[in-house]
Image (tube, grey):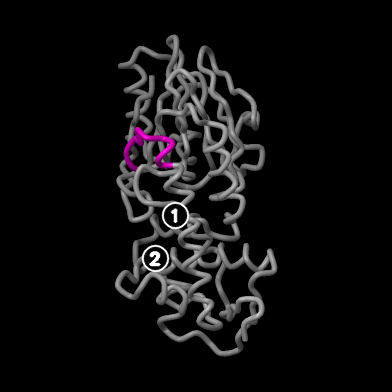
Amino acid sequence: MVTLVRAPNPSAMTLSGTNSYIVSHGGDAVVIDPGPDIPRHIDAILDRARSLGVKVRAIALTHGHPDHAPGAAALAAAAGVPIYAHPNSDVVRDGDLPLDGVFEAGSVALRVIDAPGHTFDHVVFYEPHERALFTGDVILGEGTVVIAPPGGAMRPYQNTLRRLAGEFGEARVIYGGHGERVDDAQGKIAEYIAHRQLRERELLEALSAGPQTIPELVLRIYGATRPILWPAMARQMLAYLLALEGEGRVISVPLDTPMDAQEMAIMNPPWEQIVGHEQADVIRAELGAMLHVERLHRYTLLGES
């Protein structure tokens, strides 16, 4: 059985809030992603487990972002259970998840898939009884995922999507880290793969018109009507460009000219002023925005002038 307990932390990045899941079988349960450290949310998870008549045996994290992991410590202390995460995680934990193995806690057994791309400490869980994938921020119930260097990378993410498509054809449902349940698992995975291919084609087509900076590409591909999304779009462009540069398809040259106000808004927005201190921390983690961009680069297709 899968039970959703949604955290009360809605925002532009978390949608309606972080999804915490109680996955139960035979009277035992594992909590996936307790979310932010919000006391009433931790209480809600415990209350729901009691109402279901199940015993929480462990906490398992898809990844360590601040909207998914900080509540683990409080929940672990209240329930007296251990925390498990990816071996690369910086989260304080009691043990590592067995990558590409089976994680067992009481009568609950979850297959663990190493799933780099959104972050390098990300896993996806598969529960065979429900034929369910728990995808964290690899696949959401609404919209798409931000892949933001340096914490994430585009080619590993695309490889993760292809792996899910190739190895989990029997999966029926996806429970993402945000948004609603997805009942057509294969259709959603295929949609995500196609979306990444489309964006890369758009980027290459834009660069075929001549060398451009990331702000120029953002405005050309996405348009100027949604400035709140410019920084996420910029990080997406950077992820593609780093992949293409590493493959020898694009070259970049740093510019000596300072950024103007619009370029700064795209590359280094003042997040505290826009969304407040609490949400700024989440956005910085999601967008890799701790890395301040000092100067722009101009990107050119190999062979273009």
Nearer the observer, 281 or 175: 175
Give the amino acid type for the residue marked by disc 1 in the picture. Answer: His
Q: Is residue 27 above or below residue 48?
A: above
Point 42% across, 21% down: residue: 130
Q: Residue at x 36, y 69 (%)?
A: 273
The label on residue 294 is none
Q: Which residue is mark 1?
A: 195
Rate crowding at label 2 as few (under 14), some (14 to 19) or many (20 or more) other CA atoms within 10 Å.
few
Q: Position of residue 36 (x, y in %)?
A: 42, 42
Instruction: Point out residue 300 in the picture as x, y percentages from the top left corner.
Output: 60, 79
Quadrant placement of the N terminus: top left
The vertical placement of 122 against 233, above or below, is above
Q: Nearer the viewer, residue 144 or 108?
A: 144
Whole-percent x, y for residue 112 in the image: 58, 30
* Outermost top residue: 26
Q: Which residue is mark 2?
A: 272
Secondary structure at numbered mark 1:
helix
Which residue is at 56% across, 80% downward? 296
Q: Is residue 4 left or right of residue 120?
A: left
Label 2 element class: helix
Q: In the rendered view of the protein, which quadrant contains the C terminus?
A: bottom right
Residue type beneath disc 2: Glu
Which of label 2 and label 1 is nearer to you? 1
- Residue 182 falls within the magenta-colored stretch: yes
- Along the viewing direction, whichever of 274 and 107 lies nearer the viewer: 107
208 or 288: nearer the viewer = 208
Percent of width and height locating residue 88: 66, 42
Residue closest to the far bottom = 257
Residue stretch rendered in magenta on the structure: 179-188
How many residues crowd around disc 1 within 10 Å: few (fewer than 14), some, or many (20 or more)? few
